[in-house]
Amino acid sequence: MQIAEHIRIVDAEGQLLATAAEEAGVDAKVATCPGWQVRDLLRHQGAVHRWATSYVAEGLQERRPLEDRSDLDGEALLDWYREGHRRLVDTLTAARPDVDCWAFLPAPSPLAFWARRQAHETAVHRVDAQSAVNRATHEEPDPITPEFAVDGIDELLIGFHARKRSRVRSDVPRTLRVRATDAGADAVWTVRITQDPPAVERGSAGEAECELSGPAARLYLALWNRLPFPDVSGDRALAAFWRENSGI
């Protein structure tokens, strides 16, 4: 996916998040994040948006902590979230393609990294915000396209879980397969789990002990622990192992 498309998604998803948060109210429980209320979600996502903006806008080369705005609540918190989201979108849109700043996953450029990361960060948390609205009615959240979901699965499996901090490790080597059933024959990942961070490759080479499959959007949210896995075949204990250890 192109940088401009990721930025468009950041914009749209952030607005949907704010709308859902306003409708639910800051006291509402976030069904997909046990223990969180909407105020926690807004404080977190608002801080992340400002954090991401600072790298691109200021060319920062080292990691900095997130801003703590636990003093904000109610309408002021929602306004603060919207202001930070707008600044993030404007900063990404106006940034030079060759902007040089810190990033924490491999990408064609720092700008490509931040646009992609914020698109997926905001989309997943938009689903969280809508879960606070829909928890009583059980309505489905706004849809996620298969193309974007596949991009997000790639980022999660090949990016996040290649890092040293991944807790998906096993003394006994295991092999997990992930297959999006509505996104073409190449939307398949093989995850090799050892004592080191998982080694992930696109494709279905070799045998797998367990396969997680389903529509790309549902699989994407399931891998982020927002939904149950659509379909599990083979060793279900390996699916449970992933669920228990894959938190980022």
Image (cartoon, rainbow, N blue to C red):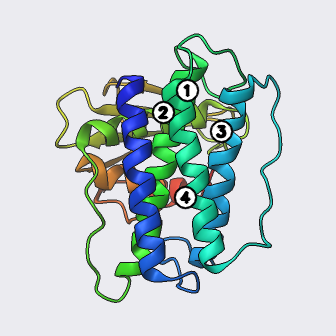
| Eye-nearest disc, 1 or 3 | 3
What residue is pinned by disc 4? 82
Q: Residue at x 36, y 23 (%)?
A: 2
* Spatial separation of the CA atoms under disc 1 and disc 2: 5 Å
Q: What x and y, as percent, mark residue 101?
A: 71, 21
* Residue 29 visible, this angle: yes
Q: Residue at x 72, y 24 (%)?
A: 102
> Which callout, 1 or 4, points at the residue further toward the start of the chain?
4
Hey, what amino acid is under mark 3?
A: Ala
- Give residue 28's mark: none
Q: Is residue 233 left or right of residue 45?
A: left
- Give residue 116's mark: 2
Closer to the camera, 26 or 165?
A: 26
Q: What x and y, as percent, mark residue 141?
A: 30, 66
Q: Residue 179's image quarter?
A: top left
What residue is pinned by disc 1? 113
Considering the numbered disc 3 on the image, is that residue within a helix, a strand or a loop? helix
What residue is pinned by disc 3? 52
Hey, what amino acid is under mark 2?
A: Arg
Hey, what amino acid is under mark 1?
A: Phe
Considering the numbered disc 4 on the image, is that residue within a helix, a strand or a loop? helix
Asked if disc 1 and disc 2 are in contact, CB closer than 8 Å, the reply is yes
* Residue 222 visible, this angle: no
> Which callout, 3 or 2, points at the residue further toward the start of the chain?
3
> Which callout, 3 or 4, points at the residue further toward the start of the chain?
3
Q: What x and y, as percent, mark residue 10?
A: 44, 43
| Eye-nearest disc, 3 or 4 | 4
